[in-house]
Amino acid sequence: MSNADMSIQLELPPELESQLSTEALRLNLPLSEYILRVLSIRQVLSNPPKTGAELVAYWQSEGVINSRPELTDSQVYARNLRHQAQTRTRT
């Protein structure tokens, strides 16, 4: 099989399409991109990381680690978020 993009037409049951569309909308993603993401994590679901190092490697490969380069000190950022949550006024 080549590395070329493959196009597949798929008819989804209406209920499944509705569920996937709702999830994609919540993440502000096009339905096709959301479905690709769901399919791409199937390997992780069948073979989850077993050690901390494997989990960190997975997070790095998915772009989670260092996904917020504007945060230079994550400890300070987390402390500020916690403070904001604890001191917000309730309506």
Image (cartoon, rainbow, N blue to C red):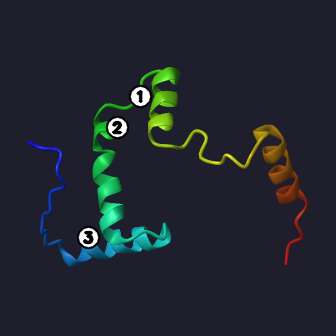
Instruction: Give the residue at x 31% y 76%.
Output: 18
Which label lies toward us, 3 or 1?
A: 1
The residues bearing labels 2 and 1 have C-alpha atoms spaced at a distance of 7 Å
On the rendered structure, is 41 left or right of 6?
Answer: right
**Type of residue at label 2?**
Val
Residues marked 2 and 1 touching at CB (< 8 Å):
yes
Report how far apart the C-alphas of labels 3 and 1 lie in the structure: 28 Å
In the rendered image, the vertical position of residue 4 relative to residue 91, given as above or below: above
* Above/below status of 78 relative to 85: above
* Viewer-side residue, 42 vs 59: 59
67 with respect to 33 (left or right)? right
Amino acid type shown at disc 1:
Pro
Q: Local crowd at mark 1 within 10 Å, few (<14), some, or many (≥20)?
A: some
For label 1, the SS is loop
Disc 2 secondary structure class: helix
**Mark nearer the N terminus (3 vs 1):** 3
Q: Are marks 3 and 1 in contact (CB under 8 Å)?
A: no
The residue identified by callout 1 is 49
Picture coordinates of residue 20, whole percent (x, y): 33, 68
Q: Which residue is drawn at 47% across and 21% down?
A: 51
Total marks drawn? 3
Q: Mark 3 points at which residue?
A: 16
Quarter where residue 7 is shown: bottom left
Q: For mark 3, give the secondary structure.
A: helix
